[in-house]
Amino acid sequence: MRIAIIGSGPAGFYAAEALLRRTDTVVHVDMFDRLPTPFGLVRGGVAPDHQSIKAVTRVYEKTAARPTFRFMGNVCLGRDVSVEELRRHYHQIVYATGNEADRRLGIPGEGISRCTPAAVFIGWYNGHPDYRHAKIDLSVSRVAVVGNGNVAIDAARILLRTPAELEKTDIATHALEALRNSRVREVFLLGRRGPAQASFTPPELKELGEMEDVDPVVAPGELAGCVIPETEGGSQQDKNLKILQSFAARAPGTKAKKIHLRFLVSPTEVIADAGGNVARLALEKNRLETRPDGTATARGTGEIETLDVGMVLSAIGFAAERIEGVPYDEKAKIIANEDGRVVDPSSRVVIANEYAVGWARTGPQGLIGSHKGASAHVVEHMMADGAGLEVRELPDRDAIGSLLKERGVQIVSFSDWKQLDDVEQARGERRGAPRDKIVDVESMLAVLAQH
Ligand SMILES: Cc1cc2nc3c(=O)[nH]c(=O)nc-3n(C[C@H](O)[C@H](O)[C@H](O)COP(=O)(O)OP(=O)(O)OC[C@H]3O[C@@H](n4cnc5c(N)ncnc54)[C@H](O)[C@@H]3O)c2cc1C
Ligand SMILES: NC(=O)c1ccc[n+]([C@@H]2O[C@H](COP(=O)([O-])OP(=O)(O)OC[C@H]3O[C@@H](n4cnc5c(N)ncnc54)[C@H](OP(=O)(O)O)[C@@H]3O)[C@@H](O)[C@H]2O)c1
């Protein structure tokens, strides 16, 4: 079997591992990524001050070392190669392209200067080539981060860390320099539902109370109506409530920066100053309503307040990008699929030999580790679907590389990536950091040309 996996994030790598370790079939995997660098959000999303999480790439390196695995970086599906071409060269295709588009608030003023999706800020500080030129103006003192998930917390934390805390991380050098001169002193984390409905996880919430120069602020009224558990432990919700209660009980802090946790508020308008930059955010107070299925939903009360902030980051989720030739589910904003088997979005009829894994399959939910079992589950479908079928004769295994080279595509192999990795780590050593990322594709290719 020859299989193409598109995307080298956790889901793609776990699918590759599940395929390559099979003993019933010899599988050759070609993994494509639009970037010259592998690992998806582990490199471009996971926060730089969470280095230990990034150690998971060692597991992926073991997969990459398997003899029937090839990495073909700097190859974008839909730009450099088409789905039709992949169908000719591979028996099966796995889309592991993640969720690279943002969800929008859809309110007046969204998109004015200094109002941006958090993904832009995150890509910028993580040195993702797409965002290296993002305009992140840190000359403001107060920032609103909309959303109550871990991405919102990541963005808030990086905005408020001291330069000393950031220097020892692999944060992009341009971001480190900008953050050194940052005037941001207060961040408002805004949840549309209540504290009990927040989706951030307890360790991430707790960390907000452990930063060098930041006091967490929870006005006692924010927890009104919440049933705070007596004991430690319990569900994520209980743990979050306990932590929030401990923040609310703290005496006013003396640290220079504050993170305010606010609940039951929805932005209704981003208001600009005369120069067209964010000046204020209008917020509507919400109350909770219980749906028939028991879940709580936010309902606006009509009561409006305005918050003086100079920047708004929205961290309200992601969507899969549309890729030419790949069926797209408009409603769920993912690749159209039934339990990982790609389907026609209207008829729901299965498109043979094409699969989706990871966020491309489910939308933006789940931690890195969750993809291990989930990708293996889809691989079981792949093997079951292929079993007993005559294996189709394919062009020579190198034909796809020749096709791409004819088009002038410079394919980056895994050993090329290891060279970039060495260069980045050596640059990082000079800065006292684990790595100093190269942030544009041209420079990456230039480094490889020199080696
Ligand atoms: C900001 C942020 C921080 C996070 N932090 C953590 C954390 O600390 N711990 C944790 O457990 N989870 C974390 N997560 C969640 C975790 O990153 C995801 O669960 C996981 O990365 C999703 O894996 P994936 O393989 O589906 O997608 P991704 O990791 O996004 O990988 C998709 C890959 O596909 C490639 N690609 C996209 N389109 C194309 C194309 N057309 N052609 C070729 N290649 C393409 C991309 O370049 C990318 O490499 C975080 C998520 C975000 C957004
Ligand atoms: N350190 C880590 O482990 C880490 C770091 C980053 C990300 N991740 C993971 O990556 C995944 C994605 O994280 P995420 O933070 O993007 O997603 P998330 O956990 O789904 O959070 C999205 C937040 O946006 C809110 N929201 C959605 N639409 C909104 C709107 N129109 N107005 C106001 N608020 C709105 C949601 O509120 P409702 O709940 O009311 O819908 C929710 O609070 C999660 O699984 C997360 O755990 C993990």
Image: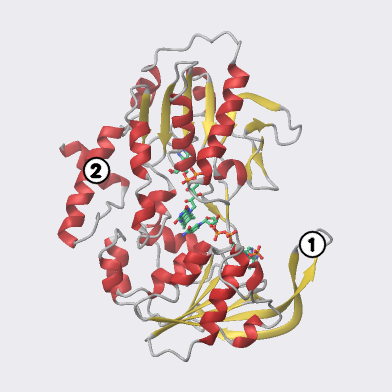
What amino acid is at disc 1? Gly
Does 279 sit above or below residue 383?
below
Instruction: Name the residue rendered at 36%, 36% in the picture.
Output: 73
Residue that mark 2 sits on: 420
The residue mark sitting in front, 1 or 2, is: 1
- What type is the residue that disc 2 sits on? Leu
- Location of residue 191 by image quarter: bottom right
**Residue 87: image x %, image y %?**
53, 21
**Quarter of the rendering containing residue 207:** bottom left
Which is nearer the N-term, disc 1 or disc 2?
Answer: 1
**Mark 1 and mark 2: span between their CA atoms?**
51 Å
Horizontal and vertical percent position of residue 33: 41, 37
- Who's the residue at 57% across and 84% down the image? 307
Q: Is residue 244 left or right of residue 36?
A: right
- 105 or 18, nearer to the observer: 18
Per the image, the residue denoted by label 1 is 294
Label 1 neighbour load within 10 Å: few <14, some 14-19, many 20+: few
Q: Work out whether 200 lies above or below 448.
A: below
Q: How is the image coloured?
A: secondary structure
Question: On screen, 321 above or below 113?
Answer: above
Residue 401, position in %: x, y? 36, 23
Image quarter for ligand 2 equals bottom right
Secondary structure of residue under mark 1: loop
Residue at position x 35%, y 63% in the image = 49
Confirm or deny contact between disc 1 and disc 2 (CB under 8 A). no
Q: Is residue 230 visible?
A: yes
Q: Position of residue 16 (x, y in %)?
A: 45, 30
